[in-house]
Image (tube, rainbow, N blue to C red):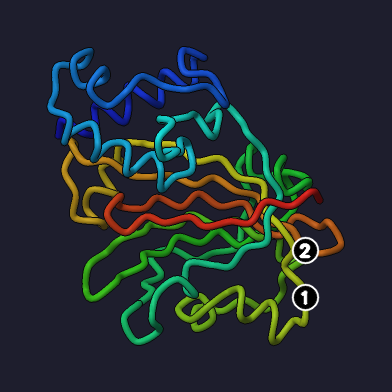
Amino acid sequence: MKYMKVVEHIQNGIETGKYAYGKKMPTINNLADQLQVSAMTVKKALDILSKSGMIERRQGSGIYVKMNTNQVKKRIPLSGNSSRFPREELQTKVIHFEVGHAPKEAASKLQISSEDFVYIIERIRILKQRPIIIEYVYMPINVIPGLTKNILEDSIYKYIRQVLKKKISSSDFIITGVRPNSDEQQYLKLSTNDFLMQIIQTVYLDDGTAFEYSIDKHIPEEFEYRSVETDI
């Protein structure tokens, strides 16, 4: 799809510094001429990038880079995917759940040893019978004890708050655009030409303990990430 190529072009421009953080970008018409696509195609791409928080449109001023995807780190109050949709419309399907060792990147973000045990979780979020998100989650079992498949099919964050009585404080995250791998194509009913919005995040309790490292991949049509930036 042409608009996905525009998304990739702009993301690459942000990552390489061609479109610098806080700076004004070319106009829609200029981008359309440069990339030899229609203005409508550019607008569709900008809608996706705006939802992801990478750019912002300022009325009467233009388009500005809001996030450097190389690694802009924020700490924000947050909620899980379960809270974004009406409960009766969202189904969660657990496709993998085991206790094991975290991969190197996850262990580093969780500030644990590669020998420490974590829950390894893969879930599909299904909205009105349409799969929209695939989640890959790692959680230290000594920080979040007692997880079960029933909890995973409901809400992990609700369990943490209501049963474990722990306070979820903030998250460091980065948002990028990616192509689905073969498993994701199957689970989300996508093709090799489709596109996903990816959030990689580390989530913290109020005492600063990292309790989750996750990679969530969303279909663009249902992607939305709201945050309130803090100084924490």
Please report the residue visible at 52 percent of the width from the left and 57 percent of the height from the top: 226
| Residues at discs 2 and 1 in contact (Cβ within 8 Å) | yes
Q: Position of residue 87 (x, y in %)?
A: 40, 84
Q: Is residue 59 above or below residue 88?
A: above
Identify the residue at horizontal 45%, vertical 60% (top origin). Answer: 122
| Mark 2 neighbour density, 10 Å: few (under 14) some (14–19) many (20 or more) | some
Report which residue position mark 2 lands on: 205
Q: Is residue 70 above or below residue 54?
A: above
Sequence-wise first label, 2 or 1: 1
From what the image shows, is residue 179 above or below residue 143? Answer: above
Whether 35 is drawn above or below 63: the answer is: above
- Indicate left or right for 210 with 137 as reference: right
Q: Disc 2 to disc 1, how far (Cα)?
A: 7 Å
Residue under numbered circle 1: 166
Residue 104 lies left or right of residue 41; in this view the side is right
- Residue 65 circle label: none
List x then y, in percent, for residue 4. 24, 33
Which sits in the foreground, 197 or 41? Answer: 41
**With 206 as the anchor, is 127 left or right in this view?**
left
Quarter the N terminus occupies: top left
Lateral position of residue 35 relative to residue 124, left or right? left
For the residue pair 184 and 50, the one nearer the viewer reads as 50
Q: Secondary structure at mark 2?
A: strand
* Residue type at the position of mark 2: Leu
Q: Quadrant of residue 178?
A: top left
Rendering coords of residue 5 (x, y %): 24, 27
Tag 1: amino acid: Lys
